[in-house]
Amino acid sequence: KQEVTQIPAALSVPEGENLVLNCSFTDSAIYNLQWFRQDPGKGLTSLLLIQSSQREQTSGRLNASLDKSSGRSTLYIAASQPGDSATYLCAVTGSSSYKLIFGSGTRLLVRP
Amino acid sequence: GAVVSQHPSWVICKSGTSVKIECRSLDFQATTMFWYRQFPKKSLMLMATSNEGSKATYEQGVEKDKFLINHASLTLSTLTVTSAHPEDSSFYICSAPRIAGGIDEQFFGPGTRLTVL
């Protein structure tokens, strides 16, 4: 059974810092991995999707990497801003369905 | 990105009543949609997979008679919470995978907050 873990559970940093969020999964037979952002009381916004054949994806200040063999992904946020404060969730899909298995999330606070 | 809508965004109801939540994919068709439940400060828990033209598939521990799912068309799935009780109060979110260029990416609705008095 696939399990997804995110570390740390919460993170508080001053504005401008570069930071890394970690995601690990127990079954390396994934189809793809997605990183999402969730603001309080809101739905999820897709940030980056990495297919199993890819090693990284970039969008603006965000860079996500994937090491399938070790079951790990990282989300790198450069030059953090207070507007980046949110919960970040990673999720994986298996090869046989579109089901997403979520990690428990990292709550990020970027202090002005 | 693709757009998925949910209606209503919030609902308050009395215990014992039924509540219907709609999930629509606005600019793409989805033969499959997913329903999640989220408790405060917790991650999303998959409840069921909604399949257009066939019965929904429920995750272990989710009562299918309690949470009725109907995938009425390629752009609409509904979740009905029957005989709602206060413990059903939660944030319900749907998602739909959009397949383009051989890549499937999940898009989420904005969620529906249900409060049962």
Image (cartoon, rainbow, N blue to C red):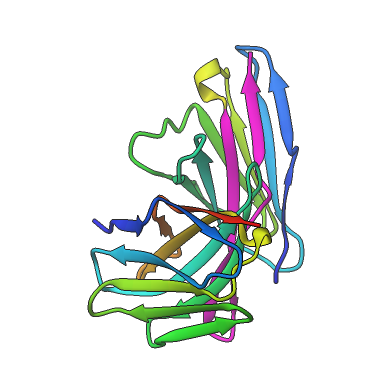
| Depth check, front residue: A37 or B31 | A37
Residue B75, image x and y in percent?
A: 70, 58
Residue B5, image x and y in percent?
A: 73, 52
Pick the quarter of the image with the C terminus of chain A.
bottom right
- Residue B112 colored in magenta in the image: yes
| Depth check, front residue: B78 or A8 | A8
Q: What is the span of residues highlighted in magenta in the rendered image?
A: B90-117
Q: Residue at x 68, y 32 (%)?
A: B20
Q: Is residue B104 above or below residue B92?
A: below
The answer to whether residue A107 is seen in the rendering is yes
Pick the quarter of the image with the N terminus of chain A.
bottom left
The answer to whether residue B52 is seen in the rendering is no
Q: Residue at x 62, y 61 (%)?
A: A84
Query: Predominant secondary structure in magenta?
Result: strand
| Depth check, front residue: A76 or B37 | A76
Whether residue A84 sits left or right of residue A33 in the image: it is right
Q: Residue at x 62, y 63 (%)?
A: B30
Figure label count: 0
Q: Is residue A94 above or below residue B51?
A: below
Whether residue B24 sits left or right of residue B103 in the image: it is right
Residue A38, image x and y in percent?
A: 59, 53
Residue A103, image x and y in percent?
A: 39, 55
Whether residue B104 sits left or right of residue A2 in the image: it is right
- Residue A105 colored in magenta in the image: no
- Residue A46 sits in quarter: bottom right
